[in-house]
Amino acid sequence: MKDRARVVIIGAGIVGASTAYHLAQSGCTDVLVVDQGPLFDTGGSTSHAPGGVFQLNYSKTMTEFARYSTQLYSGLESDGLPA
């Protein structure tokens, strides 16, 4: 494991993984993600969620976020990545 990086993300859940992904997509590749335990294959969902995305929501912002998420997951899946 690396002992230093420009960006260190603590936690490999959905927020940490998303942050690392979006940083890499924007060109920041010196990123280290650390987590407290082993990272088991969860089938694409966190341990607290069934892996579903509700596209209709109580606010316009959350609906747009859900739409972005489903488009991102579809793209990852079509690229052969776990989503």
Image (cartoon, helix red, strand yellow):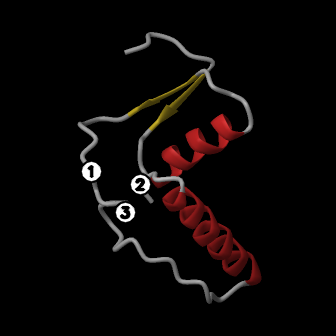
Residue 41 located left or right of residue 10: left
Quarter residue 59 falls in: bottom right
Q: Which mark is residue 17?
A: none
- Distance, label 2 to label 1, CA atoms, is 9 Å
Secondary structure beneath label 1: loop
Secondary structure beneath label 2: loop
Residue drawn at (62%, 74%) of the image: 66
- Distance, label 3 to label 2, CA atoms, is 10 Å
Which residue was labeled with disc 2? Answer: 82
- Distance, label 1 to label 3, CA atoms, is 9 Å
Q: In the image, residue 33 lies at what x, y percent?
A: 46, 31
Quarter residue 6 falls in: top right
Which residue was labeled with disc 3? Answer: 45
Three-letter code, disc 1: Asp
For the residues carrying marks 3 and 2, which lies nearer the camera in this image? Answer: 2
Three-letter code, disc 3: Ser
Residue 49 located left or right of residue 58: left
Q: In the image, residue 8 lies at what x, y percent?
A: 54, 26
Tag 3 and tag 2, C-beta contact below 8 Å: no
Which residue was labeled with disc 1? Answer: 41
Tag 2 and tag 1, C-beta contact below 8 Å: yes
Q: Is residue 47 above or below residue 19?
A: below
Q: In the image, residue 36 lies at what x, y percent?
A: 30, 35
Residue drawn at (39%, 71%) of the image: 51
Tag 1 and tag 3, C-beta contact below 8 Å: no
Q: Is residue 13 above or below residue 53?
A: above
Secondary structure beneath label 3: loop
For the residues carrying marks 2 and 1, which lies nearer the camera in this image? Answer: 2
